[in-house]
């Protein structure tokens, strides 16, 4: 099988350098790389071209349209039997393509997704954010999990689709705000087989500080409502959890300020939750510092997502505004 790896890029030349370096180490060599610069000011043309002797790599420039339509640009120019999408802030283990190829030969999937993890080189904050996004004690626990709730929806930081899927379903029809989940749902509805390849892990840097992480998760919360506008049946009870958590935090603060009796119970519940995160993160990362930062990451994730979710639920569902 010949793979086409498609990477949208926007003003991140150093990231693409690190990603391409990991691709030069792949044990499975039947692949090409398409890097599509999506209207960047700080482009990576020289960096990408420096890999020409190590990879079958092609570089393109186009006006800014967002990652969804940029991936479509790659689909139209790819030569492969199977298209793999990475975010530019990922590092790819050397055996990634070998794992995917062997898995597809054993149990073919028309589209797949893989989990993400933290690389040893990541900062403590990045490792804490990675923990939060993959922890069973946050909504991130349903990502990259074979026992997730409902249908499995690959995420575009680590996602593959066959040429047949693109030819029948087409590409992305929205470019941001949950474009990967919307695409996965359409692939499901077209009758194609989608699944998780649990060993096809990538190391995903995500954000480097909690302010950036807050902005990203606020955007994710809004994206869930955007998906609802396309597919109302895809809004599940679990998607309301971050909003409920955010409201609970607000209620706990008010009850403590006004010295209500229920404040003691609220504080107890929050303490139990904090301790669960701390000790689980410590066990997983073997670091008290990362465990402490994981508490901040988890609260940032849930409240930012919850605020974004409530903002667009109020505006686009209650008031039905565009």
Image: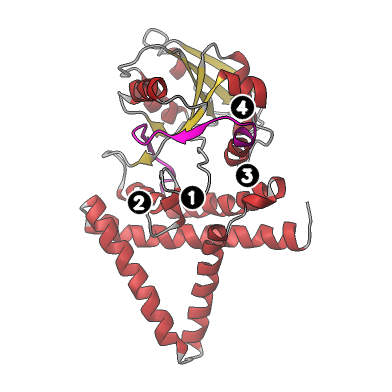
Distance from label 2 to label 1 (Cα)? Answer: 16 Å
Mark 3 falls on what kind of element? Answer: loop
Mark 4 and mark 2 lie on one chain; the one further toward the N terminus is 4
Looking at the picture, does residue 103 appear above or below residue 53? below
Distance from label 1 to label 4 (Cα)? Answer: 23 Å
Q: Which residue is mark 4?
A: 70
Q: Which residue is mark 3?
A: 177
For disc 1, the neighbor class at 10 Å (few under 14, some 14 to 19, many from 20) is few
Identify the residue at image location x=25%, y=52%.
284
Distance from label 1 to label 3 (Cα)? Answer: 16 Å
Of the numbered discs in the image, which one, if any, rests on residue 288? Answer: none
Residue 207 on the magenta segment: yes
Mark 2 and mark 1 lie on one chain; the one further toward the N terminus is 2
Of the numbered discs in the image, which one, if any, rests on residue 131? Answer: 2
Residue 106 in percent (x, y) is at 38, 23
Residues tagged 4 and 3 counted as in contact (Cβ below 8 A): no
Mark 1 falls on what kind of element? Answer: helix
Residue 216 in percent (x, y) is at 53, 49
The part of the chain drawn in magenta is: 186-208
Residue 170 on the magenta segment: no
Q: Name the residue furthest left.
A: 286
* Observer able to see residue 158: no
Mark 2 falls on what kind of element? Answer: helix
Of the numbered discs in the image, which one, if any, rests on residue 212? Answer: 1
């Amino acid at each position: 099988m010949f793979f086409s790896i498609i990477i949208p890029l926007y003003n991140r030349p150093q990231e693409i350098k690190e990603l391409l370096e990991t691709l030069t180490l792949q044990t499975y060599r039947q692949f090409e790389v398409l890097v599509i610069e999506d209207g960047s000011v700080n482009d990576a043309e020289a960096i990408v071209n420096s890999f020409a002797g190590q990879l079958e790599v092609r570089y393109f420039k186009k006006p800014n349209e967002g990652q969804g339509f940029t991936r479509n640009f790659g689909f139209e120019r790819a030569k492969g039997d199977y298209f793999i999408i990475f975010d530019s802030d990922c590092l790819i283990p050397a055996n990634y393509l070998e794992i995917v190829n062997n898995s597809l030969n054993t149990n073919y999937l028309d589209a797949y997704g893989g989990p993400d993890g933290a690389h040893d080189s990541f900062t403590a904050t990045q490792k804490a954010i990675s923990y939060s996004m993959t922890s069973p004690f946050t909504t991130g626990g349903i990502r990259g999990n074979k026992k997730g709730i409902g249908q499995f929806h690959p995420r575009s930081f680590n996602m593959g689709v066959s040429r047949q899927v693109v030819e029948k379903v087409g590409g992305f029809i929205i470019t941001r705000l949950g474009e990967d989940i919307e695409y996965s749902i359409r692939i499901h509805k077209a009758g194609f087989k989608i699944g998780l390849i649990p060993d096809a892990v990538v190391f995903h840097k995500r954000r480097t500080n909690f302010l950036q992480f807050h902005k990203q998760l606020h955007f994710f919360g809004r994206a869930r409502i955007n998906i609802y506008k396309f597919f109302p049946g895809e809004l599940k009870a679990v998607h309301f959890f971050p909003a409920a958590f955010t409201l609970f935090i607000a209620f706990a603060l008010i009850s403590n300020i006004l010295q209500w009796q229920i404040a003691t119970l609220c504080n107890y519940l929050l303490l139990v939750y904090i301790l669960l995160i701390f000790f689980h993160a410590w066990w997983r990362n073997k670091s008290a510092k990362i465990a402490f930062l994981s508490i901040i990451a988890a609260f940032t994730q849930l409240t930012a997502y919850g605020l974004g979710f409530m903002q667009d639920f109020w505006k686009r569902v209650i008031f039905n505004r565009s």
